[in-house]
Amino acid sequence: MTSSGPFPKLLPDSTSDTDAIARNDWNAYAEIDFLRDHWSVKQWAPGHTGYYWYLTFDSPELIELAAECQNALTQDELDNVPLDALHLTLAGIGSTTTVTDEQIDNLVSLARSRLTDVKPFDLTIGPLSGSRSAVRFSVSPWDPLLDLHRILRASTSESMPSLSAPTGSGGSRFRPHLGIAYNNTDRAAAELIEAVAALRDTGPATVRVNHVELVVLRRDGHSYRWDTRAAIPLGGTTVLDGALWADPAGSE
């Protein structure tokens, strides 16, 4: 199986049903014969940084779930995602060498105005599954994530028409997931798939999504790290001293 194209290739029968999403993820993962080295497949030039739209998480419930699964997967061929770096990638934007500060400021302003109509929502994280080069949780429902992806890509394209396309996949290729480990060598898949299968009854966790982040992403050894350029609240929430609080004037 090649590493090109979205994974899973097929969309789930329902983008709102947790069981359908988890089943689709697992059926695709269970059919993999060969795993790829993530760090070779995902090329990243030394010193490169790029802008991305992220959801980030510091939920104690999610951190506990991720740690439990990471501790059970003891293979040397896995590089764990640091527990303070759990994230869900919504869309890429472009390299920091080609995107200007003015473009980013315009993008943040546009996205902020459009995200006022998007209400905070909950996500179910789990069960555990994987891809051709990573171990990751299924995430559901997809519907609010697909809406965010569409809004952010449209805002990015409108703010940066000089770019041929934002970095990353289009809506038809977007597969929401949350990774907890990256495979660091090419190898047969059966052993890892068996280990992941034994953990599928662990969890799930529920997290609240009330903002999105525009980050400057870098690769630090065998992990991804970032600095937040802007945190944009959803709906009637406001950023205050790094925290998010509900704005009574915007509440229902």
Image: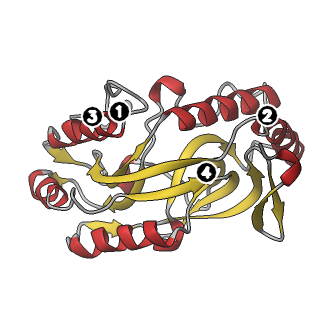
Are the residues tagged 3 and 2 within 8 Å (C-beta)? Answer: no
Q: Which residue corresponds to the image point at 85% horizontal and 53% vertical from the top-left?
A: 248
Alpha-carbon span between mark 4 and mark 3? 23 Å
- Of mark 2 and mark 1, the one earlier in the sequence is 1
Q: Is residue 230 left or right of residue 147?
A: right
Q: Which residue is mark 4?
A: 54
Circle 2 packing at 10 Å, graded few (<14), some (14-19), many (20+), is some
Residue 21 position in % (x across, y down): 33, 36
| Closer mark to the observer between disc 4 and disc 3 | 3
Viewer-proximal residue, 141 or 148? 141
Residue 222 visible to the viewer:
no
Q: Which residue is mark 3?
A: 24
Report the amino acid beneath label 1. Answer: Ser
| Closer mark to the observer between disc 4 and disc 2 | 2
- Of mark 1 and mark 3, the one earlier in the sequence is 1
Query: Disc 2 on helix, strand or loop?
Result: helix
- Of mark 4 and mark 3, the one earlier in the sequence is 3
State the image quarter where residue 225 is shown.
bottom right
In the rendered structure, find residue 4 and report the number of the disc placed on it.
1
| Closer mark to the observer between disc 1 and disc 4 | 4
Report the amino acid beneath label 3. Answer: Asn
Quarter of the picture holding the N terminus: top left
Are the residues tagged 2 and 1 within 8 Å (C-beta)? Answer: no
Viewer-proximal residue, 232 or 189? 232
